[in-house]
Amino acid sequence: MGSVDDYIAQAIDRLNSDDIGAAIQMYREALKLDPSDPTALTGLGAALDESGELESAIDCYRKALKAAPDDVIARSGLGVVYEQQGDIDVAAQEYRAALSIDQQTAFLHIAYARDRHQKRLLREKEGYELKAKELAELIDRYASITEAVDRDVAKYFPK
């Protein structure tokens, strides 16, 4: 069993290698040891955001802000999640709050989180494009098979 800091370090490593599921697990292990650790809550929020679990991410960020009201990463992360949900007013409000705490860190974190989100969307797009290509090939193969069957049947049942 490791310490909260050990689990957080492992989670960050997993997050940076895009092993989001393992990062989530490591953050949860840290929170078993200290359920109100703001760093673990903020990290879990970021990992949940990356996995698309936006409501859970919001919950984590809010818990982190209860434990550490001036946590600029939690505040800006909350803004990023609301931005993804299309809630522009709330996102802007969270960004303003983060910027008032620490402008440089807030700008960096917002850019970092947006970049990771965009990369996730691009990976998803690539997955959909690959699936669309596979489906197009299946459709073409099915069309060829049905044509062959129809030709064969037509031999025995001419019009």
Image (spheres, rainbow, N blue to C red):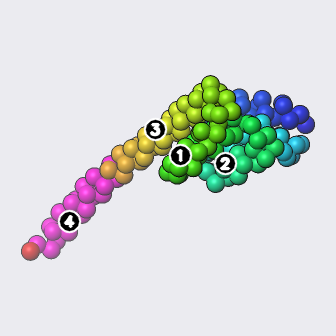
Q: Are marks 1 and 3 in contact (CB under 8 Å)?
A: no
CA distance separating discs 3 and 2: 21 Å
Sooner in the amino-acid sequence: mark 4 or mark 3? 3
Sooner in the amino-acid sequence: mark 3 or mark 2? 2
Q: Are marks 4 and 2 in contact (CB under 8 Å)?
A: no
Q: Residue sitting at 58 percent across and 34 percent down? A: 110
Q: Looking at the picture, tell me which residue is in the foreground, 134 or 24.
A: 24
CA distance separating discs 4 and 1: 53 Å
SS at badge 2: helix
Q: Residue sitting at 32 percent across and 50 percent down? A: 136
Task: Look at the image and give the residue range highlighted in magenta.
Answer: 137-158
Name the residue tied to disc 3: 122
Q: Is residue 42 visible?
A: yes
> How crowded is the residue under tag 2: few (<14 C-alpha within 10 Å), some, or many (20+)?
many
Residue 87 in the image: state x and y as whole percent. Answer: 52, 52
Sooner in the amino-acid sequence: mark 4 or mark 2? 2
Number of the label disc, if any, that sits on residue 150: 4
Residue 100 in the image: state x and y as whole percent. Answer: 65, 34
Residue 33 in the image: state x and y as whole percent. Answer: 89, 42
Magenta residue check for 112: no
Q: Are marks 2 and 1 in contact (CB under 8 Å)?
A: no
Name the residue tied to disc 1: 83
Q: Nearer the viewer, mark 3 or mark 2?
A: 2
Name the residue type under label 2: Ala
